[in-house]
Amino acid sequence: MKLGIIGLPGSGRRTLFGALTGVVNQGLYGNSGQNIGIVKVPDKRLDWLTELYAPKKTTNAAIEFVLPLGSDRTSLRQADALVHVVNCFGNENPAENAEDLTTELLLSDIESAEKRIERAKKNAKGDKKFAEEAATLERLRNHLGQGKPAREFDVSVPELLTNKPVIYVANVAESGLSDDKFIFDGADALTVCAKLECDLLELEPDERQTFLDDLGVSETGLDAMIRRSYEILGLISFLTAGKDEVRAWTIRDGTKAPGAAGKIHSDLERGFIRAEVVAFDDLKANGSMKAVKDKGLARMEGKEYIVKDGDVMNILFNV
């Protein structure tokens, strides 16, 4: 999963990037290019499975955060979703700031649409299908020109910035963490103090939780970001466990067993026979895979099985 962090100057987007990734003050102040930070997704289920199996290695799911610098938005077009940081402290007007950046994204998409229209019209001289493409793109350009994002258009154009899901982050002062929630574009924003998140990096894990408890905050900004990103992208995790490796795999909610197997390796999807499936909660409640099987809680599922969040799976295949 890749998330692109955006925000107007002074929004705190660089501070938030540093807090989320641990990449603080390392090249974050250039005027071009991008910074990338890869973060492990915390998962207590993996921690428990690691204790049970004592594997050679444990592999968490991961999120890649991208912070573009300057006006280059190329990296954002490859992101799965955008994290829009809005300055909500001081004398700023948060709603106006959020709208200003949204307008910038719309203008960028209009420019992209116009370039594609020009190419399609040139190609239409030799192939009529490009004439249809040009007509669709012209409708899209008019749609964007009315201030409507690409995600509300009747044809999906994944690379356009306003086609991507958005996680709004209200960057507040520490004293504002308990204030009223912010809503942008009809969506509840995550309330985060980016500076505080950076300060938390200097504390040990147990000290962080104590500090958050004192503030009346239930989770870190990173935890909230991960939870929201999985929600808006419709993602879940299934698990594999053994002596060699315990691992979390991220898939789309609604994925069938062969598709989940393909996430591990294409051969497993191609030669899929069936999957042995155990719900993590059943495994934890009974303490071992043997106990789960003895109680008949392990299931053999076929190609039509829709994988659920927290399924512990063993894929049977033949290539």
Image (tube, helix red, strand yellow):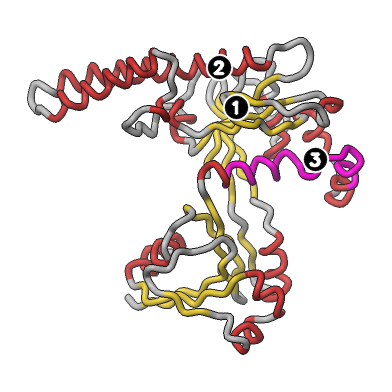
Q: Amino acid at mark 3?
A: Leu
Q: Could you say which quadrant of the image residue 258 lies in?
A: bottom left
Work out whether residue 6 or residue 25 is closer to the camera in this orientation and state it.
6
Magenta span has 259? no
Q: Amino acid at mark 1?
A: His
**Residue annotated with mark 3:** 201
Q: Residue at x 52, y 50 (%)?
A: 235
Q: Is residue 28 left or right of residue 126?
A: right
Q: Is residue 178 left or right of residue 289?
A: right
Q: Is residue 212 left or right of residue 64?
A: right
Magenta span has 221? yes
Q: Amino acid at mark 2?
A: Leu
Q: Residues within 10 Å of mark 1 (few under 14, many from 20)?
A: many
**Real-space Cα separation, disc 2 to disc 3, in angstroms:** 29 Å
Residue 192 % position (x, y): 74, 32
Label placed on residue 84: 1
Q: Residue at x 68, y 70 (%)?
A: 49
Residue 134 % position (x, y): 21, 22
**Residue annotated with mark 2:** 101
Q: Secondary structure at mark 2?
A: helix
The magenta stretch is 210-230
**Real-space Cα separation, disc 2 to disc 1, in angstroms:** 9 Å
Image marks 1 and 3: residues in contact by CB distance under 8 Å = no
Residue 130 % position (x, y): 16, 27
